[in-house]
Amino acid sequence: MIEYLRDPERIHEQNYARLREQVDLSAFTPEQQLVVIQMVLAYGDPELVKYIRFSENAVSVARKAIKQRNNLLYDADLVKHALKESLLYQEPLGFMGRASVISQAKSTKQTRAMTAVDCWKPYMSGGIVLIGQSATALLHLVELLQEGVRPPALIIASPRGFVNATEAKKLLWKQHQELGVECIVVDGTRGGGVLAAAALNALLMMQVQASPAP
């Protein structure tokens, strides 16, 4: 018989213990650490901590948006599928599958995720936006905010890849104060929908634990 750990509680405990042994979380506040831990666990690489950035009020505005049950928007279905349904207070909004979005994306030769961002305008103000896959969606979102569209409270930006991703995240970080939006960013080519979802899951859990029992 192969010897390996089977007990889910012990596996969970050892995951957290070994992660804390391997990563230096001293650059983050205690609340930020809770988010970082979930992102690293989801990614499976302790080196990720070097690439995660929080704007000054990212966690506090996220918790306020969650408390107020503001809208949640996402760029790709992979993000939605990685969210914990038990923590969600509403159905997250994504528009990539709309026939009008698919048709327009084909006719304009741009990504569906980018095209879908235009559908976010009526829902975005004060909400939380998760962009975990598409750098073009993030770039177009920044364009809309530059044009004066009312911003979300928080953008969680973790698109990955070697085209547009690094540049899009750098641009958001550089302009977030001017645009009036807080952000959590995974620098460089690293990223993925699971990271954006892990960050929101951590924020949702934080708010659940802070809420008084019914």
Image: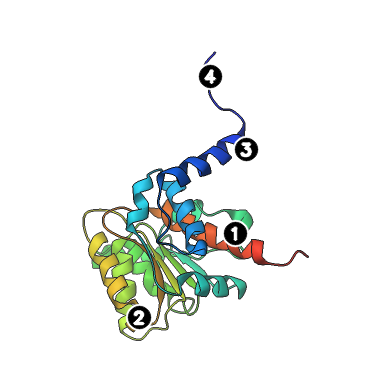
Q: Earlier in the sequence, mark 2 or mark 1?
A: 2
Work out which residue is located at the far top of the displayed protein and give it: 1
| Residue located farthest toward the bottom when viewing the structure as drawn | 148
Q: Rounded to the nearest whole Å, what is the CA distance between mark 1 and mark 3? A: 18 Å
Q: Earlier in the sequence, mark 2 or mark 4?
A: 4
Tell me where residue 159 sits by quadrant: bottom left
Circle count: 4
Residue 205: give its label. Answer: 1
From the image, tell me which residue sits under label 2.
Answer: 177
Identify which residue is drawn at 56% across, 70% down. Answer: 63
Q: CA distance from mark 4 to mark 1?
A: 33 Å
CB under 8 Å between callouts 2 and 1?
A: no
- Which mark is drawn over residue 44? none
Looking at the rendering, which quadrant does residue 179 occupy?
Answer: bottom left
> Would residue 193 appear left or right of 136 to someone viewing this image?
right
- Please tell me which residue lies in front, 141 or 190: 190
Give the numbered dot on residue 3: 4
